Image (cartoon, grey):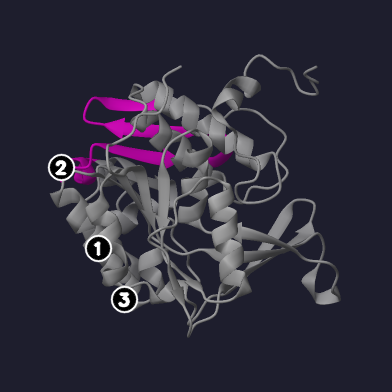
Amino acid sequence: MSGPRTVPGGVDLLTVGEALVSLRSSGPLAVGGPLTMHLAGAETNVAIGLARLGHRAAWVGRVSDDELGEFVLRQLRAEGVGTDGVRRDPDRPAGLMFLERRTADLTRVRYHRAGSAGSALHVDDVRAPLAAGARVLHLSGITPALSDSAREAAAFAARAAAAAGVTVSLDVNYRARLWPRAAARAALAPLAGYASIVIASEDELDLVADPGADEATAVAGLLRRGVRTVLVKLGSAGARAHTRDGVERLAAVPVTAVDPVGAGDAFTAGYLSGHLDGLDLVDRLRRAVALGAFAVTARGDWEGLPRRDELSLLTGNAAGTTLR
C-alpha cells in the first residue's frame, strides 16, 4: 500500500470552509434530554479523514473567540489537522447544528448558523494559507452559500490555487435550506471551472452544468471545461467516476449503517487520499467507498473514520467478526 507523500513547505490538503458545533440527541429534541457535543462541518470532516490516513491536512476558517471556538480547535488539533490559518472572531458566535435521531431510520438536522463566525470568512483569511502551498485545495458548495464574503473567499481560493497549479477539488454539497438552486448554480458553475475534481450526487450535477442537464450531458460539459474527474456519489449503490477515458463504477461496501451523516465527506476524503498517494482511478474509488462505509458504521460525522493501518478491516472479515 502506498504511503502519504508531502509537499515541502506546504501541506498535502488545504480545506477552506465552516466548522460547526454539533449537538446530538438520541431522541426527539422537543421533549428534552441529554445532548452530546461534537465537531461537524463538510471541510473539517474531509481534513480529519486525510489526517487520519497520515496526510498533512490543514483547515482554514473562522471560529468564535469563546469556549465553543476553543472546542473546535482542540478537536481539529487532536486529530492532527493544522489550524495555523484559523482566525478567532470576537464579534460572532459559533455556528450550531442540532441533530436528533427521530426514529431508528430517520435523523433530522437543524442549523443555527446565520451571522456565525464561520459565515464571516473573508478573502484575507485565505491569502497566507494558500501562499504557504498545498498539493490539493478542497472546497464545498456549502461555504459559498453562507455569505457574500464567504462566496468571494471560495472563488478567490479556487482561482489562486488553479493559477498556482494546485489541484482543486469541489464537492457540490447542495443545501436547499441555505439557498435556492438558481443561486447555487450561479455561484458553483463558475467555481467548477477551476476544479480538477468535481464531486456530486446525481441530483446535484446540474448545479455545475446547464439547468436540467442529465448526467451524461453535465459530465461531458465539465470535462470540456477542463475538469479531469467527475465523481458521482450514489449512496448505498456506490459511485461512478467519469474521465475522458470513460466511466468506472464501483459498488458500495456492505456494512450495517448506524448514522449516514458524514458519509459523503468520508467518500471525498478517501478519494483525495488515493489521489495524493498516486493510486489509479479504480483504487481511488475503492478507498473512497471504504471510507464512506467506515463513516456510516459509527455515530458522528467523522468519528468512525479509519487510520491507515485499518483500511483493510472491511475486506475479508465477515459480519460480527471479533479480531483477537
Say which residue label 2 marks.
224
The three-letter code of the residue at mark 1 reads: Arg
Relative placement, left or right, of 153 versus 291 is left
Residue 252 position (above or below residue 178) = above
Q: Residue furthest bottom?
A: 91
Q: Nearer the viewer, mark 1 or mark 2?
A: 1
Where is residue 271 drawn, in percent x and y? 42, 34
The disc at residue 149 is 3
- Label 1, on which residue? 127
In this rendering, position of residue 221 left or right of residue 154: left
Distance in Å between CA atoms under marks 1 and 2 = 29 Å
Q: Amino acid at mark 3?
A: Ser
Residue interval drawn in magenta: 220-248
Judged from the image, the secondary structure of the residue bearing numbered disc 2 is: helix
Vertical placement of 268 versus 213: above or below? Answer: above
Does any portion of residue 180 appear in the rendered image?
A: no
* Residue 140 is a magenta residue: no
Looking at the image, is mark 1 or mark 3 earlier in the sequence? 1
At label 2, counting other C-alpha atoms closer than 10 Å, the crowd grade (few under 14, some 14-19, many 20 or more) is few
Q: Nearer the viewer, mark 1 or mark 3?
A: 1
Residue visible at 55% across and 35% down? Answer: 291
| Residue 147 horizontal side relative to residue 153, left or right | right
Q: CA distance from mark 1 to mark 3?
A: 14 Å
